[in-house]
Amino acid sequence: MQPKTEARRFAKFAVVGFSGLIIDVTVLNVLKLANVSTPVAVAAGFVVAALSNFYWNRRWVYPETRAVKKRRQLPIFMIVNAFGLLINEAIFYFFEAPFTSVFKGILISNPMLAGTLGLNFTKGVGAVIVMIWNFVVNRMVTFRNIGAIGAGADSIPDPDDAVESAL
């Protein structure tokens, strides 16, 4: 593992993570508008984003790992992400109300806006913490069997694609 290679991987992982965050926040806010409880909305957004992140991590960040079957990698990835979800849920449990109170103090005239800002600010704090967790643990566990990014790494065939395209 060369530091430049890992820095490049982390940058790609961050891009994938940011796109997942957009998905996560969108699902979270849509479900909250539909009066779904915060823990359920957080979990749903997290799962949808994790599935997207798995796809893009496998395709772009760690293309060398496509030799490993998806049905082996995905459960490991989801278990790692489940721990990330627990971290995220704990952050919401402890910090959403205090952050919302701070925003209510600033935006007394619009408590709904304060609640939305508190929800999303808490999500941002959780996202940074969980991104670090996910990168470190997924690199050491889910995507551990990788070499350096080299020429042709992005063109490694996915053995599961032949089965999927035949269906």
Image (cartoon, rainbow, N blue to C red):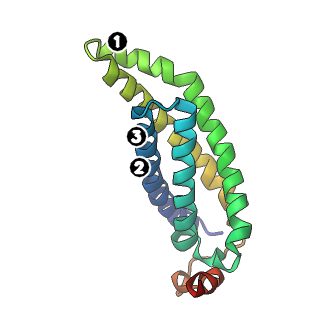
Question: Please, what secondary structure does the residue beneath circle 1 have?
Answer: helix
Residue 110 falls in image quadrant: top left
Mark before the other along the chain sequence, 1 or 2? 2
Residue 89 falls in image quadrant: top right
The residue lying at 52 percent from left, 30 percent from top is 38
Tell me which amino acid carries mark 3. Answer: Val
* 2 or 3: mark nearer the eye: 3
Question: Please, what secondary structure does the residue beneath circle 3 have?
Answer: helix
Closer to us: 77 or 2: 77
The residue lying at 43 percent from left, 43 percent from top is 25
Separation (CA) of disc 2 from disc 3: 12 Å
Q: Is residue 167 above or below residue 37?
A: below
Viewport quadrant of the C terminus? bottom right
The furthest residue to the left: 109
How many circles with numbers are drawn on the protein?
3
Separation (CA) of disc 1 from disc 3: 25 Å
Label 2 CA crowd tier, 10 Å (few <14, some 14–19, many 20+): few
Tell me which amino acid carries mark 1. Answer: Gly
The residue lying at 67 percent from left, 71 percent from top is 70
Q: Which residue is mark 1?
A: 105
Tell me which amino acid carries mark 2. Answer: Ile
The answer to whether 96 appears left or right of 71 in the picture is left
Q: Is residue 167 above or below residue 113?
A: below
Question: Please, what secondary structure does the residue beneath circle 2 have?
Answer: helix
The x and y percentages for residue 138 are 66, 58
The residue lying at 69 percent from left, 44 percent from top is 83
Q: Which residue is mark 3?
A: 30
Viewport quadrant of the N terminus? bottom right
Separation (CA) of disc 1 from disc 2: 27 Å
Q: Which residue is mark 2?
A: 22
The x and y percentages for residue 53 are 53, 59
